[in-house]
Each structure stands twice: as C-alpha cells, then as structure tokens.
C-alpha cells in the first residue's frame, strides 16, 4: 500500500478531482429527469454484457456488444434535452447587466399579484422568468412587447379576448420581452393526467433551461411554480412570492 501511495503523482490527484467534479455536475444535471431511468437501463445492459460473457452466452453477448458499438450515438439522441441544457449553461454569458434588487423584487410582486387576479378569474396563464440561461430563441418566435412588468399589462395580455393570450409571456428582470411565445412540451410519461398543456409546457422549458415558470390553471385557477423540471402546486399568494423572492435573492448572492 505504501509503495502505491509513493507512486501517486499530483497530476493523478488532479485528474481524479476533475473527473469527480464532472461526474457530480452531470448527476446534478440529470437528477429528477428521464435520463436517470435511461442510465439505469444502460447500466443493466452493461451487467448483462458481463454476465453473458462470463456464462458463455455467445449470441446474447454478440447482440449486446453490437448495441454498445452504437451507444455513443444512442446516448446523444436519448439525452438530447439534457445535453442541450448543459451546453447552454456552459456557454451562457449575461445578456444584460443585472438590474437592481429593488426593481426586480417589485417585478416579482407585480407578477404574483397578476397571477392571483388571473387565478381568481380562472384565466389560464404562463409567465416565464429568465434566469441565467438566455431565452432569446423563444422570445424571437413570440410577439415583442418590451414593457415594464405590471399587473395591468399581464392581465391585458392573458385576457381571453387578446390574440396572444394562449402563449407564454417571457420576462427578463423587470421587463416583459414578448408574449404569445410557444414552449417545448415535456415528453415525460409519469405526469398526473390532470396536468394540461400549460403544465407540460412549463415543465418542458424548465427541463431545457433554468427558467422559472408561474402557471395559472384555467380549469381551477390554481397557482403553480415550475423550476428545474419539477412543479410545486398548489401555491397561495404568500408562498409563491416567497419562493420567487428567495430564488432571485440567492441568485444575487451567487453573483
């Protein structure tokens, strides 16, 4: 044992630390997503490969080995959303300087007040709040607004008579960038059947980016918050405000 320790170089320790950090970040990235189940399936296939080789099951071994020859391509296809999310986080730079805490928290209050009003009237809504990863691609397919976040504007956008009420609103800092934006739907099969298209769209955008999405159900008026591929529901006005405030306060501390 002592002889082995003597032959360990500082480069070996650095190498192990880098690999450990990368694996840890990857595990955090896929936590709670469908990639976990896929990785378990790949692990079972790997075990089957070793067992078929040990037990001399030549046909089974050949079939699994042939699959592993294409495993890299298969993983790229299967984990496409997770890979896109990881690359977006790695390459993202702030699009605009961070606004002052006071104006950002005022926007959160206006958004929450709008969500409560919409919920009381049972008017469905999707309000997407940009965080570190830019939502520029989704903004471009919507209708430009570029207005200060306010309860009145949000209510007018999601009014049933509005031509853009069906899409999502995207907010950056204290500005509404666009409305009528279309979001990607999650492909998860384990969701409650009561979750409609709005909830699936909210999960879809939070699986691909780090955005936070406030959802107002058209059927029940219930308020929900989607972050990192999960939904917290139902929420009252105070809980929703606290969750959003804590989320962006933590973002400020990290900066």
Image: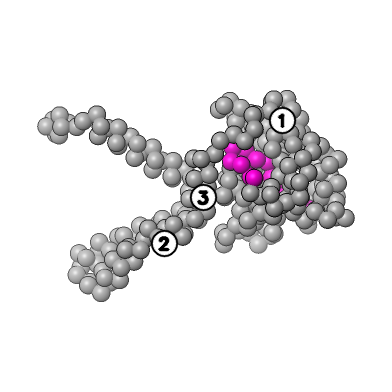
Point out the image quarter for the C terminus: top right
Which color scheme is applied?
one colour
Using the numbered discs, state the Cα–Cα distance from disc 3 to disc 1 in whole angstroms.
28 Å
Q: Nearer the viewer, residue 200 or 70?
A: 70
Q: Name the one closer to the observer, 215 or 242.
A: 215
The label on residue 84 is 3
Please name the residue that numbered disc 1 is placed on.
Answer: 104
Indicate which label's residue lies in the foreground, 3 or 1.
Answer: 3
For residue 113, say whether it is visible: no
Residue 40 % position (x, y): 40, 57
- Please indicate whether residue 26 sits to the left or right of residue 123 in the image: left
Q: Which residue is mark 2?
A: 74
- Name the mark on residue 176: none
The residue lying at 77 percent from left, 40 percent from top is: 146
Element carrying mark 1? helix
Q: Position of residue 231 (x, y in %)?
A: 63, 48
Q: CA distance from mark 2 to mark 1?
A: 42 Å
């Amino acid at each position: 044992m002592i002889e082995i320790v003597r032959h360990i170089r500082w480069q070996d320790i650095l190498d192990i630390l880098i690999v450990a950090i990368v694996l840890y970040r990857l595990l955090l990235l896929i936590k709670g997503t469908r990639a976990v189940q896929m990785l378990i399936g790949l692990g079972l296939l790997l075990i089957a490969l070793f067992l078929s080789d040990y037990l001399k099951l030549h046909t089974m071994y050949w079939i699994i080995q042939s699959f592993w020859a294409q495993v890299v391509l298969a993983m790229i296809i299967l984990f496409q959303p997770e890979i896109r999310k990881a690359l977006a986080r790695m390459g993202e730079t702030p699009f605009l300087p961070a606004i002052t805490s006071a104006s950002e928290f005022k926007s959160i209050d206006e958004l929450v007040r709008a969500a409560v009003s919409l919920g009381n009237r049972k008017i469905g809504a999707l309000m997407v709040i940009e965080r570190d990863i830019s939502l520029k691609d989704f903004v471009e397919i919507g209708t430009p607004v570029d207005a200060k976040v306010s309860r009145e504007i949000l209510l007018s956008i999601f009014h049933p008579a509005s031509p853009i009420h069906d899409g999502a609103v995207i907010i950056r800092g204290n500005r509404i960038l666009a409305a009528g934006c279309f979001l990607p739907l999650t492909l998860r099969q384990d969701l409650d059947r009561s979750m409609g298209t709005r909830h699936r769209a909210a999960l879809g955008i939070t699986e691909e980016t780090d955005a936070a999405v406030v959802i107002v159900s058209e059927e029940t008026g219930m308020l929900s918050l989607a972050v990192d591929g999960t939904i917290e529901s139902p929420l009252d006005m105070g809980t929703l405000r606290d969750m959003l405030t804590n989320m962006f306060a933590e973002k400020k501390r990290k900066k």
